[in-house]
Image (spheres, rainbow, N blue to C red):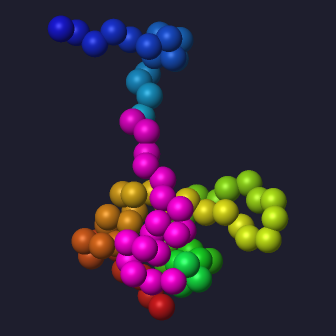
Amino acid sequence: MARTRTHHEEMTGRELEPPTELLTVSEVAQRLRVDDTTVRRWIKSGALEAILLPHRGKRQGYRVKKSTLDALIHGTTAVSV
C-alpha cells in the first residue's frame, strides 16, 4: 500500500525529516556516568555538540541529539577533557 502525502509534503514538494530524539544534560550525564557539570563543560568547550535552547533563569538549556551521543559512545566522536 502506498504512503499518502502529508499537507506539508503537498505544499512544499518535499518530505519532512524524521523527528530527532533530544536528550537533556542530565540524561547524557547518566548514560555516560559523569556529572552534569562535566557534560556542560564538554558542550561549552565544543567537545560535545548540543542544541542551545532559549534561555531564562540561572542555567543555559541544552539538548544533545541521541545520534551524537551514540557516535560518542561508539568511538566515532572524540571528547577532549
Residue at 33 percent across and 9 percent down: it is 4
Residue 22 lies left or right of residue 33; in this view the side is right
The boundaries of the magenta stretch are: 18-35
- Residue 69 picture quarter: bottom left
Measured as percent of width and height from the top left, residue 13 is found at 46, 16
Q: Residue at position x 51%, y 83% from top?
A: 35
Q: Residue at x 81, y 65 (%)?
A: 57
The quarter of the rendered structure image containing the N terminus is top left
- Magenta stretch containing residue 48, yes or no? no
The part of the image, by quadrant, that contains residue 61 is bottom right
Magenta run includes residue 25 = yes
For the image, the number of numbered tags is 0
State left or right for residue 24 relative to residue 53: left
- Which residue is drawn at the image coordinates 48% and 91% (left, top)? 81
Using the image as rendered, state which of residue 30 and residue 19 is in the foreground. Answer: 30
Query: What is the x, y in percent for residue 34?
Result: 45, 83
Classify 35 as above or below 26: below
Vertical placement of residue 31 versus 6, above or below: below
Is 79 placed above or below 26 here?
A: below
Q: Observer-nearest residue: 34 or 4?
A: 34
Residue 81 can be seen, yes or no: yes
Residue that protrudes farthest toward the right in the picture: 57
Q: Position of residue 40 (x, y in %)?
A: 59, 77
Residue 46 appearing in the image: no
Q: Residue furthest left?
A: 1
List x then y, in percent, for residue 7. Answer: 50, 11
